[in-house]
Image (spheres, rainbow, N blue to C red):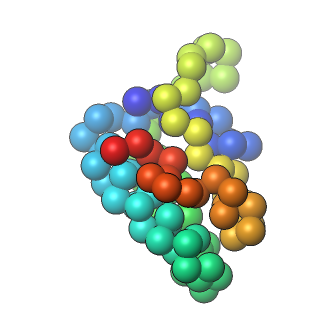
Amino acid sequence: MIVRILTEGQFNLPGAFIDELNELDNKLVEVVEQDDQENFGPALEALLDLVREHGTPVPVDELVESDLVLPEPDITLKEAEELFVGEGLVPD
């Protein structure tokens, strides 16, 4: 799965991590829905770190369509409220 982190680039994330990615996404949706500023940063960072640590960067000169687009690391909770609704970013 090709995952783009806005402002950072694309990563090829092996399918073995999709369930974990979905779990972290669901947790982040809960945090956003609860307007939980204290846990927002750590929840977002966990989601992005999974992609960074287990994904392989896609070369910048390689044009590949992203299967999933994650927000930039410095997104605010208010901005995230517009993105993280319903099922979240990762479809079930």
Q: Residue furthest bottom?
A: 38
Q: Foreground: 23 or 30?
A: 30
On screen, residue 63 above or below 25? above
| x, y percent for residue 16 | 25, 40
Side of 82 where 55 appears, left or right:
left
On screen, residue 69 above or below 47? above
| x, y percent for residue 15 | 29, 35
Residue drawn at point x = 38 percent, y = 51 percent: 21
On screen, residue 64 above or below 78? above
On screen, residue 37 above or below 15? below
Residue drawn at point x = 55 percent, y = 72 percent: 33
Q: Residue furthest left?
A: 16
Q: Quadrant of residue 64?
A: top right
| x, y percent for residue 62 | 61, 14
Q: Quadrant of residue 60?
A: top right
| x, y percent for residue 49 | 49, 56
Q: Foreground: 15 or 52?
A: 15
Locate the C terminus by quadrant: top left
Side of 51 where 20 appears, left or right:
left
Residue 54 seen in the current view: yes
Locate the N terminus by quadrant: top left
Residue drawn at point x = 44 percent, y = 57 percent: 25
Side of 85 where 46 appears, left or right:
left
Residue 57 seen in the current view: no
Residue drawn at point x = 41 percent, y = 42 percent: 91
